[in-house]
Amino acid sequence: MKKFMVLALGVTLLTGSFGLAVPVSAETPSTTNSNLSTQEWCKGISQQYKYVSKFYADYVIVSGGPSYISNVYTLSVGVVGGTHSDKSLVLRKEREDFRGPAEAVLQFKVTFYGSSASGDYWVKLNVGGGNAWESHS
């Protein structure tokens, strides 16, 4: 069983934006742990707001069969320059199938003080096709 930690770090500014997801570290396939960190940020010239979110999941990649996520736990959301609410960590789809990968999703709302960048955010673990990867809003 592999352990997976998803970490999304965001910096939001009032003007201009682009995003980037970067794997910071990953264990070799022969080990039992796999850590993946991602960073997302937006660029601009005004006041800066930041958020960080993470959760852990246990998953198994099955060669020649459906991979699966068995457990999701220990969610965390933090905001600098605002607040967060409505955190939800859901094992949306436990097993990979012909419709797509197994999925676990952390969703949350962020309100940045005095900013229009407030809204709904999410980070998702996908497991299927012999791989595990992260996607985020």
Image (cartoon, helix red, strand yellow):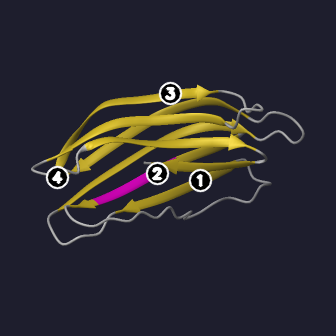
User: Which numbered mark, 2 or 1, is in the foreground of this view?
Assistant: 2
Q: Residue at x 15, y 68 (%)?
A: 46
Residue 97 vertical placement versus 10 (above, below): above
Give amino acid for label 1.
Asn
- For marks 3 and 2 on the same chain, the one whose residue lies earlier in the sequence: 2
Q: Quadrant of residue 92?
A: top right
Q: CA distance from mark 4 to mark 2?
A: 19 Å
Residue 74 placed where, x, y %? 46, 34
Q: Is 8 a magenta residue?
A: yes
Q: Which residue is mark 1?
A: 35
Give amino acid for label 2.
Leu
Q: Please say if the residues under marks 4 and 2 sit with CB atoms less than 8 Å apart.
A: no
Q: Quadrant of residue 99?
A: top right
Q: Which residue is mark 3?
A: 90
Q: Is residue 115 left or right of residue 41?
A: left
Q: Which residue is mark 2?
A: 7
Q: CA distance from mark 3 to mark 2?
A: 16 Å
| Other residues around mark 1 within 10 Å, as few (<14) / some (14–19) / many (≥20) | some
Chief secondary structure of the magenta portion: strand
- For marks 2 and 1 on the same chain, the one whose residue lies earlier in the sequence: 2
| Other residues around mark 2 within 10 Å, as few (<14) / some (14–19) / many (≥20) | many
Q: Which residue is mark 4?
A: 81
Q: Which of the pair 29/46 is nearer the observer?
A: 46
**Mark 3 secondary-structure assignment:** strand
